Image (spheres, grey):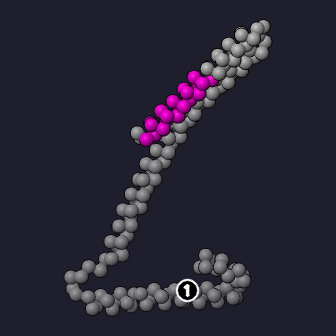
Amino acid sequence: LAAMQSRFPGLLANSENCRGWCGAQIARHCNIYRSFLHLLQDFRQEAPAGADLEFVNKAQEVDAAWVKQEEEFRGADAAFQERERVHTKKWEEKRLQLTEERDVKVKELLERADKAQTKAESQLLMQQARLFGQRLDAQIERAWEEQRKEREAR
């Protein structure tokens, strides 16, 4: 009744109107359940002697089986999500390490190229920086592919 009462904000708790409303609601619900019980009683009188009338229990058993299966699926899904999170974190750390290594080395080579005495030395260092960056970019790309393949395999 409290949940139903919340739909009617004009009813003040413990007021005369609220008590009257609660009494009317209780009577209404009792009449509904009483009519269901009368229908069931009439049906039982009309039903053959060997008829199985435990439809509520069977529905509850089926529902309980569904709930149990859903809980198992939720548990398996949560475990899978946790494994995926750990796996993704490991790969992300590896990619971040490769990216950081690339950035540091390329920055160092470019700084050395800026300070180079000759143009040939400067070009050589810039070429090394570009090739090193490309090599590590390829490693990062391979890491992405490995992660994707492992995820598909799981």
Q: Along the line of sight, which residue is nearer the eye, 32 or 136?
A: 136
Predominant secondary structure, magenta span: helix
Position in image of residue 51 (x %, y %): 24, 82
Specify the farthest residue to the top.
117
Position in image of residue 108 (x %, y %): 71, 17
Compared to 4, does 145 lie above or below? above
Q: Along the line of sight, which residue is nearer the eye, 3 or 87?
A: 87
- At mark 1, the secondary structure is helix
Q: Which residue is drawn at 67% across and 85% down?
A: 18
Q: Which residue is drawn at 29% across and 80% down?
A: 53
Residue 94 seen: no
Position in image of residue 145 (x %, y %): 49, 34
Q: Residue at x 71, y 9 (%)?
A: 121
Residue 61 seen: yes
Residue 143 drawn in magenta: yes
Looking at the rendering, in which quadrant would you find the N terminus?
bottom right
Q: Along the line of sight, which residue is nearer the eye, 145 or 65?
A: 145
Instruction: Identify the image quadrant of residue 9.
Output: bottom right
Looking at the rendering, in which quadrant would you find the C terminus?
top left
Instruction: Identify the image quadrant of residue 110.
Output: top right
| Picture mark count | 1
Position in image of residue 54 (x %, y %): 31, 77
Residue at the spot of label 1: 26
Q: Residue at x 44, y 36 (%)?
A: 150
Specify the farthest residue to the front.
120
Q: Label 1 amino acid?
A: Ile
Compared to 91, does 23 lie above or below? below
Compared to 39, does 118 lie above or below? above
134 vs 65, left or right, is right
Q: Along the line of sight, which residue is nearer the eye, 7 or 94?
A: 94
Residue 39 drawn in magenta: no
* Magenta extent: 133-152
